[in-house]
Amino acid sequence: MTTNHDPQLLGAYALGVLDEPEARAVEDHLASCPRCRAEVAELREMRDVLGEVPPEALLDGPPEDGDLLLRRTLRQVRAERGGQARRRQVGWGLVAAAVAAVVLGGGFAVGRSTAPDPAAVAQQSSPPAPPAGTKVGSATDPDTGARMTVQVRPAAGWVRVNASVAGIAQDAKCRLLVVAKDGSTQEAGSWLVSSAGEKDGTNLDGSALIAPEDVAAIEVRTFEGERIVTVPV
């Protein structure tokens, strides 16, 4: 095959779409043709620049008449294939058409994106606010070294409890208690500390039939009644 100054092959070579024998033939020609080497360098530079369009600029879908623009570009490339006087533009046309096909076919458009609304971003990234009247607290017991962080959410005459407990030895049998202001308790849950729980802590969800306004503390005790950690709320 001949490759002497053939912009069609140079454009396809710059895009990396030639098969291996064609690519080798082009490379053999480039080895002895500074003119074509320069043209390939320009084509690759254009390809690389277009490939560096940031993703943030490609958010709003194809522009109006995007398909028509692509069809016009392809028609121009086909028309230029038959003309010797403008064959250099064919190489550029192949690159432009390929880029347009990727961009428009992928549903992207350059230059039509808008900056995200900071309030919307904050709303998406922030967890939902807890219900009104939610109580939170943390404590570390100085004697046992156990640590606990709790959240107590009010319901209609009762409470939901979430507790993250750490610093308790494996195989300990524990009870999670809700302590009322009058000193009475209601059990919100119980568990056996695992090896992972000893190392990384345990997260628990429970509930207790105590009015939200009457809750004074959340407490962990052994089944024998030994207090491990208490968090006033």
Image (cartoon, grey):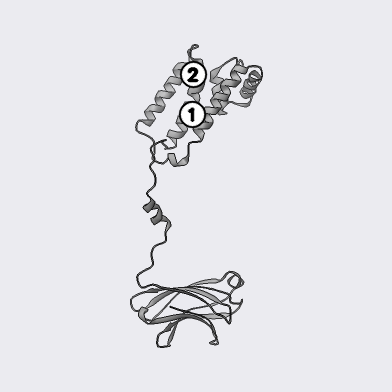
**Which quarter of the rendered picture does the N terminus lie within?**
top right
Q: Secondary structure at mark 2?
A: helix
- The answer to which image quadrant residue 224 occupies is bottom right
Q: Is residue 233 above or below residue 89?
A: below
> Type of residue at label 2?
Gln
**Which quarter of the rendered picture does the C terminus lie within?**
bottom left
Image location (x, y in percent) of residue 22: 61, 22
Q: Nearer the viewer, residue 173 or 166?
A: 166
Which numbered disc, 1 or 2, marks the residue that appears first in the sequence? 2
Residue at screen point 49% across, 19% down: 90
Q: Which residue is mark 1?
A: 98
Q: Is residue 103 above or below residue 209?
A: above
Q: Nearer the viewer, residue 221 or 115?
A: 115
Residue 213 horizontal side relative to residue 39, left or right: left
> Type of residue at label 1?
Ala
Q: Secondary structure at mark 1?
A: helix
Image location (x, y in percent) of residue 25: 64, 20
Q: Is residue 216 above or below residue 77?
A: below
Q: Is residue 128 above or below residue 56?
A: below
Image location (x, y in percent) of residue 230: 50, 80
Dot in front, 1 or 2: 2
- The answer to which image quadrant residue 133 occupies is bottom left
Circles 1 and 2: CB atoms closer than 8 Å? no
Q: CA distance from mark 1 to mark 2?
A: 14 Å
Q: Which residue is mark 2?
A: 89
Residue at screen point 48% across, 23% down: 93
